[in-house]
Amino acid sequence: MILSHVRAGDLTLVVSPAHQVEISAIADATERVHLLTLLQQSGVKPAFDLPRVRQRAEALTAQGCGPADAARLAFAEAAGADFVTCDDRLLRQCRRVGSSAWCGTPLAFCDKEELV
């Protein structure tokens, strides 16, 4: 549902360097190419203040987030984007560290945005 709204132009899919790194590590070539193509065709790559994002990611790591999770969250905060994940553990961390980004599951995001 979320992707259909992205493709229709109703929502913006923000792509960060963290996405590229994470997807590049996927062993299955078909899945990797599919996801990279999706991001290229449907995503928007904003300009990021990389030193600021790195500083925030390091602060999040110091608060107990894993490095990859901290980077993804720091990029979302820097973009002023919502942070959607299926990872319940990561959602608990987002709440614990007091992220400035809205953080929730895909279902909660659909409810928040009243997607039908």
Image: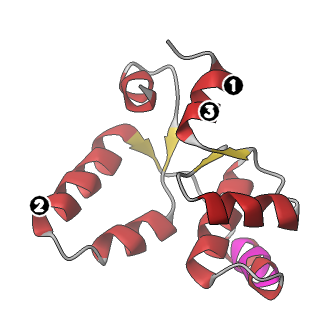
Alpha carbon of mark 1 to alpha carbon of mark 3: how far?
A: 5 Å
Q: Are marks 3 and 2 in contact (CB under 8 Å)?
A: no
Residue topped by disc 2? 30
The vertical placement of 43 against 74, above or below, is above
Q: For residue 67, what is the image quadrant? A: bottom right
Does the stretch in magenta take in 58?
Answer: yes
The quadrant the N terminus occupies is top left
Residue topped by disc 3? 109
Alpha carbon of mark 1 to alpha carbon of mark 2: how far?
A: 32 Å
Does the stretch in magenta take in 35?
Answer: no
Left or right, 31 with respect to 36, comes to left
The vertical placement of 70 against 38, above or below, is below
Q: Residue at x 66, y 55 (%)?
A: 76
Q: Which residues are magenta?
A: 53-59
The kind of secondary structure element at disc 3 is: helix
Q: For residue 81, what is the image quadrant? A: top right
The spot of residue 116 in percent (x, y) is 49, 12
Q: Is residue 81 visible?
A: no
Residue at the extreme left of the image, as rendered: 30
Q: Amino acid at mark 3?
A: Phe
The vertical placement of 16 against 107, above or below, is below
The spot of residue 46 in percent (x, y) is 56, 51
Label 2: how many Cα within 10 Å (few below 14, some 14–19, many 20+): few
